[in-house]
Amino acid sequence: MIGTWHGLIMDCPNPQALSAFYREVLGMVEVQDDGDWVVIGDAPDRPGIAFQQAEVYTPSTWPDPSIPQQMHLDIRVDDFDTAEAAVLKLGARRLEGGGETFRVYADPAGHPFCLVTM
């Protein structure tokens, strides 16, 4: 195991509205609301679903592949460098972007995911 699942992030035009929908559907509670970033889950210290404000948002046309799904996984790790070496060895590639607490990658099929630290 390289890391543990930390969260699923969904781009959307209105994080509060979409999080309210999923709170009702899944019976979760809101654990964070920063306006353009809302997180729901079972508890603040457990993996959850985050809704991220997207200024320009085009909904998926799935199953028509012309506009693919817009989600990515956050995977919590203890050490960026060790985890990065492991995911690259498995076929991931580093993508532009990231910050002090996260790094962005693409899985072998091109889906984005982040390694995160707390």
Image (cartoon, rainbow, N blue to C red):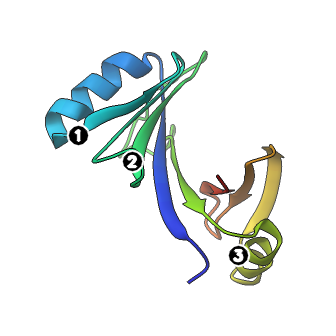
Q: Earlier in the sequence, mark 2 or mark 3?
A: 2
Identify the image quadrant of residue 98: top right
Q: Is residue 63 left or right of residue 56?
A: left
**Where the N terminus falls, by quadrant?**
bottom right
| 3D distance between C-alphas at marks 2 and 3 | 22 Å
Of residues 108 and 61, which is closer to you in this image?
108
Name the residue tied to disc 3: 87
Q: Is residue 49 left or right of residue 52?
A: left
Residue 36 percent location from the top left of the image: 54, 19
Residue 77 percent location from the top left of the image: 64, 67
**Residue 32 in the image: above or below residue 81:** above
Name the residue tied to disc 2: 48
From where the camera sits, is residue 69 visible?
Answer: no
| 3D distance between C-alphas at marks 2 and 1 | 9 Å
Residue at image coords 61%, 56% = 113
| 3D distance between C-alphas at marks 3 and 1 | 31 Å
Residue 107 percent location from the top left of the image: 64, 66
Mark 2 in CB contact with mark 1 (< 8 angstroms): yes
